[in-house]
Image: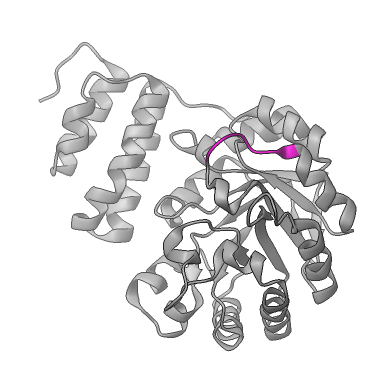
Amino acid sequence: MPISLDSLSIDPPVLLAPLAGITDLPFRRMVARFGAGLVVSEMIASEDMVNAKPQARAKAELGFGEAATSVQLAGRDARLLAEAARYAEGQGARIIDINMGCPAKRVTATGGNGACGSALMREPDLAIRLIEAVVGAVTVPVTLKTRLGWDSDCLNAPDLAARAEAAGVRMVTIHGRTRNQFYKGCADWAAIRAVKEAVTIPVIANGDIIDAATARQALQLSGADGVMVGRGAQGAPWRLAQIAHALFGTPAPRVPTGADLADLIIDHYDAQLSFYGRELGLKTARKHLSWYLEEAGALTHRAAILTSDDPGQVMRLIRASLCDPGKAAA
């Protein structure tokens, strides 16, 4: 069951996907405390990290040095990618992940920092040069995240994965869609099997995996060694642990309810305010609060919770919603 990358073991092989604006350090810590084999940082542009833009470095307070954390980098300049990877390793990153799967137009468009992410699937020779540069720059394991291809006429993930393995990549994660599909339709987990058959390194299946049932089906169809979960963990940081329990027999997480759930949400809320500062933290926390309340079916004070700028009031309303829904909070 465990995936071994040098001295680092991914156990269980249930990973948290990098999600822009979501998988920040407070959220990754919340998921990790329930149990995840690996959590991956938000994607960071290598140029931004090298040039020390505050937002990039803030994102990359990446849980440097924390167990089971991977730092994901993007870019199309070999020197900058290598330098960013060296910086991340020097700060304590356990794994460097290269993003060649992001479909966003701002990432894949030409110009500036663009034409990276999944756009690199159209330039496999450049993609391999970038991988070689990163592998040569660090001593920690280097992994790759990509898609099935650019479009239905360019399904080159198996070839790219095989070349990446030869270049030193230690694990590859495949989202079961092409770039041009973005997030439309359904992930094709069966198509990931061609990647698994093309390499000897571990393969992780990604896309539309939201619970134990979808994770089990993804593994069966793809033959992959593990799964990566993204939106399924929104509002449910225990979801990865539930999947690991169902698929790999790890201990079942204790899913909090009532006052315990209120405590967990408030801990996460407070961590957001501490990490970002009050002004920005109030904004970044709202999406998480919305997902928690929706997951719990606690909608009594939802509108007030998501619009209040008073942390004390937000905390009182969370407790009122989860502990005594019929009681109006002060």
**Of all residues shown, which one is farthest toward the front?**
153
Q: How is the protein colored in the picture?
A: one colour
Q: Position of residue 41 (x, y in %)?
A: 52, 60
Residue at image location 47% in from the left, 26% down from the top: 256
Quick check: 122 above or below 219?
below
Residue drawn at point x = 36 percent, y = 78 percent: 53
- Does residue 77 appear to the left or right of 145 in the view shown? left
Residue 23 appears in view: yes
The quarter of the rendered structure image containing the C terminus is: top left
Residue 130: quadrant of the picture: bottom right
The segment highlighted magenta reads 184-189
- In which quarter of the view is residue 70 placed? bottom right
Rendered image quadrant of residue 6: bottom right
329 in relation to 137, above or below: above
Q: Magenta-highlighted stretch: main secondary structure? A: loop
Rendered location of residue 44, percent (x, y): 48, 68
User: Total marks drawn?
Assistant: 0
Q: From the viewer's perspective, is 218 left or right of 77? A: right
Q: Is residue 94 visible?
A: no
Quarter that holds the N terminus? top right
Q: Is residue 170 magenta?
A: no
Q: Residue furthest top?
A: 326
Give the residue displayed 23% in from the left and 22% down from the top: 320
Name the foreground residue: 310 vs 14. Answer: 14
Residue found at x 39% / y 82%: 52
Horizontally, residue 46 falls left or right of residue 157, namely left
Q: Nearer the viewer, residue 107 or 318?
A: 107
